[in-house]
Image: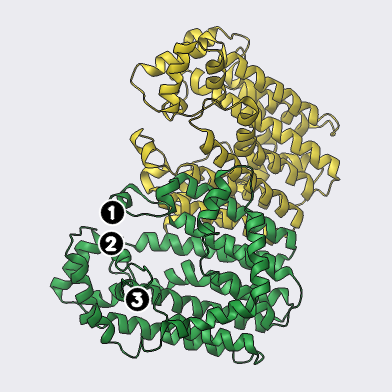
Chain colours: A green, B yellow
Amino acid sequence: MDGLLTSEPDVYSASPLAEGDALQGLAQLLAADLAATNATIVARMASEVELIPQLAAHLIAAGGKRLRPLLTLASARLCGYRGERHVRLAACVEFIHTATLLHDDVVDESDLRRGLASANAVFGNKASVLVGDFLFARAFELMVADGSLEVLRILCNASATIAEGEVLQLSTQNDLSTDIPRYFQVIQGKTAALFAAACEVGAVVADRDRSVAASLSGYGTALGMAFQLVDDALDYAADQNELGKTVGDDFREGKLTYPVLIAYAAGDPAERAFWQRTIERGEQSEDDLGTAFELIARHDAIGQTIERAREFARSAQECLADLPDDPVRALMMQAADYAVTRRH
Amino acid sequence: MDGLLTSEPDVYSASPLAEGDALQGLAQLLAADLAATNATIVARMASEVELIPQLAAHLIAAGGKRLRPLLTLASARLCGYRGERHVRLAACVEFIHTATLLHDDVVDESDLRRGLASANAVFGNKASVLVGDFLFARAFELMVADGSLEVLRILCNASATIAEGEVLQLSTQNDLSTDIPRYFQVIQGKTAALFAAACEVGAVVADRDRSVAASLSGYGTALGMAFQLVDDALDYAADQNELGKTVGDDFREGKLTYPVLIAYAAGDPAERAFWQRTIERGEQSEDDLGTAFELIARHDAIGQTIERAREFARSAQECLADLPDDPVRALMMQAADYAVTRRH
């Protein structure tokens, strides 16, 4: 693992703390909006059915980066919006995100054998599904109260795209013949669609014209792609001792991710047989994770993944080129760099 | 079982086929609308992600009674509506219903031990969740395309109520101390809320005033309660040889239903110990279903359940009293009787 990291010195050269500054900077600049969003989230997950706030709090109150609502707040401010609607919509975006996390927690018997742990491990499949449904419905109720059919259209559409992306991931998850365009289609759905919608609704509440909304949507899509690719990379590259992040989760779950597709495509027959056994058939023994790291390193799969992420980050920044040059835009530009250089 | 049925001769006196006529009559009267609804359903569940139409078809194309969309179509016609929007909204209602069925299919490890079989058994938990999410999102996209915030409000609200009802059911499912009001809260959420919303949107598309919408919503709620109570009863009373309906599913799944609550409340200590073992702790052996039938019969729990259903059916009919006396209303009145007298 150290070998892996030192073989890509350019990728991880900046200090992680300095890299974090872009998101922290946005959160500081938008502190009042973010606090109001958090208050809305807590108020709206209330239910007399106790299990609902209990389980929702397990995810929502636990914190998280609030990355997606931050994008809504930032986009609205960048578009010159001065009202309060963006707070409610940022809460919607976080509810949708949390609902998809809960639904992503649902496991099949085969997964249980692999020993996953999650909110699901505490509350069970059924609770994860139903509380997720409740949060989805709450998100849509909030949007209806807001009253913009355009916002509803954007977030309904994103929800359908997320579900399609997740189903596609499920259909391809044990299939190493999945090609790169198809893999991009999966992560565009499961990750980038909500990033894009989160940004786009910011332009819509500010009543800016379609070209501005399209630029922000493009920024969100590219940023989401970069984030997901780096997530893929970190699972095979992050320093296990750093910040409690565990590596190898994707491998143990038999997930088909970008680094694996690269290593598989470049592998010799013996290597391909290794990936087929461990990923396609899910037959793994203790030494396999080490072998996976070796093969990933041998073909520079992390470097290639990060390079793809960097391209998406550049494209995200280009989308902001025509928007006003102000502190929010500067931090959104830096957030794209951070997406690539972050270590966790 | 025969003993059970013959002990309530009044309850099941009418012929099952004659009883079916109310729904069949509605379906015939609204045949063109229903055909258009089916076409919309098939068109809108399309996706290039193959698993989606595959799994959705498993439920939707398999038929089913189309009871909820029929309520939307009937309510709209009863309100004098002559346009086409009700067809799209009827499809939404069926998508929401199908999504909740898919999510209801999701099981925990403990359920797997009890040997449930469903769409889930073929496709798995994860697929059921994600395709359900896709259908939810599609339903909301259809509503956004329709453009009525009032319709969106009604169906978002129903979706949140359904999820809350299902979570409440999950929280109380092994708790025999659940009281009747709480049980009614569960079925009001999981079943009656969508019946009510299905009827109410019919009044909304017809642009009728709030009092008409409220009457139809009240009809739907009461009809849904009656349907659910009779479902509860049939699981302990239906003739197993008739139409392939299996009895005892609820018992084997350890479901807390109205007849069980009645029998438990009236039971002596030994009987209560039986229900605690079989329902609360889920410890069942082969003879237990027979014993459950005996205890249900001993306390006339089926008769009491049907009587409650009959009260709800009467209340449903009263809700229609002020609406125009036409063939649709007559069939909706009969449908409330059918809810109680049906055998399957």
As displayed, is residue B17 above or below residue B201?
above
Which percent across, then down, holds residue A230? 39, 77
Q: Which mark is residue A114?
A: 1
Please report whichever mark, 1 or 2, sits nearer to the chain's N-terminal start.
1
Q: Please give the residue where the numbered disc 3 appears in the rendered image.
A: A233
Amino acid type of the residue tagged 2 in the rendering: Arg
Same chain letter for marks 3 and 1? yes
Amino acid type of the residue tagged 3 in the rendering: Ala
Task: Using residue B161 as the reference point, say whether residue A14 is left or right of it.
Answer: left
- Chain letter behind tag 2: A
Please report whichever mark, 3 or 1, sits nearer to the chain's N-terminal start.
1
Which residue lies at the image location 48% right of the left edge and 59% below the top edge?
Answer: A101
Which residue lies at the image location 36% right of the left edge and 23% below the top edge?
Answer: B284
Q: Please give the residue where the numbered disc 2 appears in the rendered image.
A: A252
* Quadrant housing residue A1: bottom left
Q: Are marks 1 and 2 in contact (CB under 8 Å)?
A: yes
Task: Using residue B79 as the reference point, say whether residue B171 is left or right of it.
Answer: left
Q: Residues within 10 Å of mark 2 (few under 14, many from 20)?
A: many
- Chain letter behind tag 3: A
